[in-house]
């Protein structure tokens, strides 16, 4: 169950139902940076929407009554095996995007940034992540321009509309 608005009231709703109905719901997104490069992930092919597409470091929905920062920390560990980073809240973003198969993400997102040490280990969960890589913001924007369908809709939105606020790069 994730926090979603139903008839103007924040209510616990099943995740798939939330996306089928296009309900506005809470989310978190994390961008991990190392030496001016962003860690991006390619979503596992088993994901029920946007499988195989490149996204920011991690993103998810908090559980009911879970503080957003706790959710972001938890999800970094679950998806990528990342622990021990200090998250900095960068702001809130709202977006709505069709993500395929009749599903819609309408998210109110708390966005976090973290600096990673050079020796930070990664242990991607294959049920969540099929690949990772570090890339400069400039190269990422160039790749998105060349092959937009290889990237999630929310990554497009974050970089097109909010990169200064999120990354400050």
Image (spheres, rainbow, N blue to C red):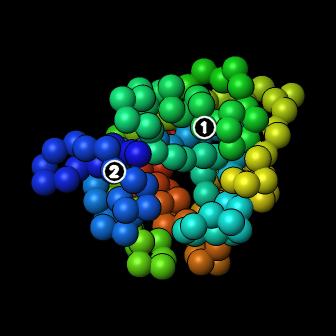
Q: Residue 51: x percent and y percent?
A: 64, 69
Question: Quarter of the image containing the N terminus?
Answer: top left
Q: Nearer the viewer, residue 154 or 101?
A: 101
Is 77 or 20 nearer to us in this picture?
Answer: 20
Q: Name the image quarter holding residue 148.
A: bottom right
Judge left or right: residue 18 versus residue 99: left
Q: Residue at x 69, y 33 (%)?
A: 77
Q: Residue at x 47, y 71 (%)?
A: 99
The residue tagged with tag 2: helix, strand or loop?
Answer: strand
Contact? badges 1 and 2 (CB < 8 Å): no
Residue tagged 1 = 75
Residue 2 location in percent, x, y? 39, 45
Disc on the earlier residue, 1 or 2: 2
Q: Is residue 112 left or right of residue 12?
A: right
> Which of the two discs, 1 and 2, sits closer to the camera?
2
Is residue 49 or residue 1 the one in the foreground? 1
Mark 2 crowd level (few <14, some 14–19, many ≥20, 10 Å Cα)? some
Residue visible at 31% across and 65% down in the picture? 22
């Amino acid at each position: 169950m994730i926090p979603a608005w139903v008839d103007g009231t924040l209510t616990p709703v099943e995740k798939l139902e939330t996306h089928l109905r296009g309900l506005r719901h809470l989310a978190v997104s994390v961008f991990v940076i190392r030496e001016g490069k962003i860690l991006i992930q390619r979503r596992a092919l088993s994901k029920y929407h946007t499988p195989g597409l490149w996204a920011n470091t991690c993103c998810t929905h908090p559980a009911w009554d879970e503080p957003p920062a706790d959710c972001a920390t938890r999800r970094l560990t679950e998806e990528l095996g990342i622990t021990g980073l200090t998250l900095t809240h960068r702001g809130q973003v709202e977006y709505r995007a069709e993500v395929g198969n009749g599903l819609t993400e309408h998210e109110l997102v708390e966005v976090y940034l973290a600096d990673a040490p050079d020796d930070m280990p990664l242990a991607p969960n294959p049920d969540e992540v099929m690949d990772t890589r570090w890339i400069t913001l400039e190269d990422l924007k160039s790749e998105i321009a060349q092959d937009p369908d290889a990237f999630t809709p929310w990554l497009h939105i974050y970089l097109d509309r909010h990169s200064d606020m999120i990354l400050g790069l």
